[in-house]
Amino acid sequence: MSPAPAIEITRTARKSGEWLSDLPAAAFDFTPQPELPSILVDPVRRFQTIIGFGGAFTEAAAVTFAKLDAASQASILKACFDPREGNAYSLCRTHINSCDFSLGNYAYDEVDGDVELAHFSIERDQRALIPLIHAAMQAAGGALRLVASPWSPPAWMKTSGVMNYGGKLRAEYRAVWARYYTRFVQAYAEEGIPIWGLTVQNEPDAMQFWDSCIYSAEEERDFVRDFLGPELARAGLGHLRLIVHDHNRDYLYQRASVIYADPEAAKYVWGAGFHWYVGDHFDNVQLLHDAYPEKHLIFTEGSQEGGPHQGDWAVGERYGRSLINDLNRWTEAWVDWNLLLDEQGGPNHAENYCSAPILASTHDCGEAWVAFQNSYAYIGHFSRFIRPGAQRIICASTLDELECTAFRNVDGRIAVVVMNRGDADLAFALQFAGQTAAVEAPAHSISTFRFEE
């Protein structure tokens, strides 16, 4: 009989102060634990393959980063991107033109009527945003995929004439707006930054006080089918993953299904992205997969609104709950919002302040500091141990309070993430291959258990 595999345990817990802490190993044996609730892990059935985890490069994050001293910058890069000692982020997001977490509205071509895009320039991004992306790519060892999303076309392309407060893309500019995406991808490639995927529009169903643009599902379908998809193909960029919806889970099925139901539009679309800002609606993620299993799912943005919430334990638990439930419903990648923000939860030109996993106070505000929030640790329980290429496997809990998911990595190591958001410590039996280990999920904790298959 082969020896039972050792179980490596990493934990973050509110009461004990454990923070991505390695604990003494446990071991499986053949002793039944019928008195305990259980979590069964079984790799016999495999589901989706993980692409990666990460956060967003915004101008706000980049400007905050640029104001820090070299040691603080190095610590942030290592914490987020180092594949051995950090969170090993491998998939991130950025914005095309400005977003709310920019210092103000800007577009790469602000010359009214410039349909040839003769004045297109990413000079604004070259100041802070692109240097941060380059530094992150280096820290990640070059293994970093990037999704790009527009919040708004230039003001002159819109019915409203402004980038904020919604408005729509003017019909006569649909072709030039499609070319705009290709120009962006080509310009970033010239900077040594390959783009992995594009979303059609950030939050296309929301009139925001900041950069925004409204599309109905039918308008998004038609733009993809008649303009953006063909333009990417003509430019030799048909390999890019084109992602629709990029908004909340509540209307994920309704909007994505309109696009998927049109074969001429659907052929250009890799999958759908979603956010968490209106209810949970986790079942809608499952429903879209069940209806269109050939399409992919990616969580493209989540952030605790009304930030900065420094030290609030519930923020991390919100991250953990979303990660577990989204992953268990066929999500292949999960991308946080701003990588870091200042002590106010900005800068943000619309004063739409939010939390971030890393907060920093710059020298401009007095004594400099960098503070890692528990959302950083909660993401790390997934991103550090569930690596690109991992496949989800069966993970069944007998107790609602034990929220869990499990993956088999390409090296054969299994990672099981277990979260307890309740006030009571919970002992449970971790079951695998006919063996059992008696382990614990303390109150308000998240743990990752790893062992060889």
Image (cartoon, rainbow, N blue to C red):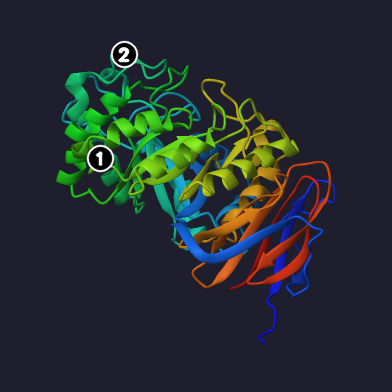
* Residue 361 placement, left or right of 235: right
Identified at 48% across, 61% down, the residue is 46
Which residue is at a point 54% across and 26% down the rendered structure image? Answer: 278
Determine the secondary structure under disc 1. Answer: helix
397 or 337, which lies in front?
A: 397
Instruction: Look at the image and tell me whether residue 123 can be seen.
Output: yes
Q: Which residue is mark 1?
A: 266
Give the farthest residue toward the front.
Answer: 34
Label 2 sits on what residue type?
Gly
Rendering coords of residue 246 (x, y %): 41, 34
* Residue 390 appears in view: no
Whichever of labels 2 and 1 marks the residue nearer the N terminus, that label is 2
Query: Which residue is disc 2 drawn over?
Result: 161
Residue under the point 67% across and 33% down: 343
Can you say whether 17 is above or below 215 in the image?
below
Quarter of the N terminus within the rendering: bottom right
Q: What amino acid type is highlighted by mark number 1? A: Ala
- In the picture, the quarter occupied by the C terminus is bottom right
Residue at 32% in and 19% down:
155
Residue that extends furthest to the top in the rendered view of this protein: 160
